Amino acid sequence: MTLESAALANAAAPFGGAVAARPRFTISEETTGDVVAREALLDACFGPARFLKTCERLRAGRLPARGLALSAHEGERLVATLRLWPVLAGSGRPALLLGPLAVSPDHRALGLGAAMIETGLVRAKARNHRAVLLVGDAPYYQRFGFERRLTEGLALPGWVDPARFLGLELAPGALNNARGRVSAAGAFAPAATTAALPRAA
């Protein structure tokens, strides 16, 4: 499914209203043809240190959640990427991990990052996912409903600044009394697929 960015304001209404992305942007499910451009964009935005992040331990060798790997294009050019990943928020409590989100440097301050997040959350809720976790800047992500208090009983498999570890309930009470370690829960990616991915130097 492809969403014209002009229509994102309606789709995103439950998560904060209108989106400022320009109408010529389209947000759609990622295809195999996006992979090389996606990896190049992630390298440009985060550099090789992205593979050392704590959240990478929950993504490495796994597939993103079905229907929740998103790309934004301006014409034929990929200008933003976002994926959400299945995890367990403690024992037996399914959730999603949001990220990484990357927007091409020359397309920032246009509302495109917000549009990607809002689209991802709308799609996640439509697929009956109940909760989303992330590591990011609280002042930015609070506008989408993410809160620190929802993750206070959870631990990631490595150090992060606790103030940046946030949660969002897509269903009321989904993270109520959540305790324990966050662990990977997604399907394993085929070995040939992961071996073929470009890696940062």
Image (spheres, helix red, strand yellow):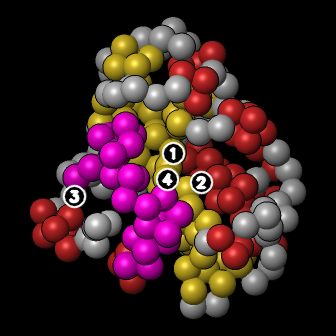
Looking at the image, which is closer to me, 43 or 14?
Answer: 43
Residue where numbered disc 2 is placed: 120
Q: Is residue 98 depicted above or below 76 in this figure?
A: above
Percent x, y for residue 104? 61, 72
What mark, if any, has residue 98 been given in the picture?
1
Q: Nearer the viewer, mark 4 or mark 2?
A: 4
Q: Distance between the residues labelled 1 and 4?
A: 7 Å
Residue where numbered disc 4 is placed: 100
Q: Are the residues flagged by discs 1 and 3 in contact, CB closer than 8 Å?
A: no
Which residue appears at 33% of the width and 52% of the height?
51
- Tag 1 secondary structure: strand
Q: Distance between the residues labelled 1 and 3?
A: 18 Å
Percent x, y for residue 199? 28, 67
Mark 1: few/some/many CA within 10 Å (<14, 14-19, 20+): many
The magenta stretch spans which residues?
36-61
Residue where numbered disc 3 is placed: 189
Percent x, y for residue 61? 22, 52
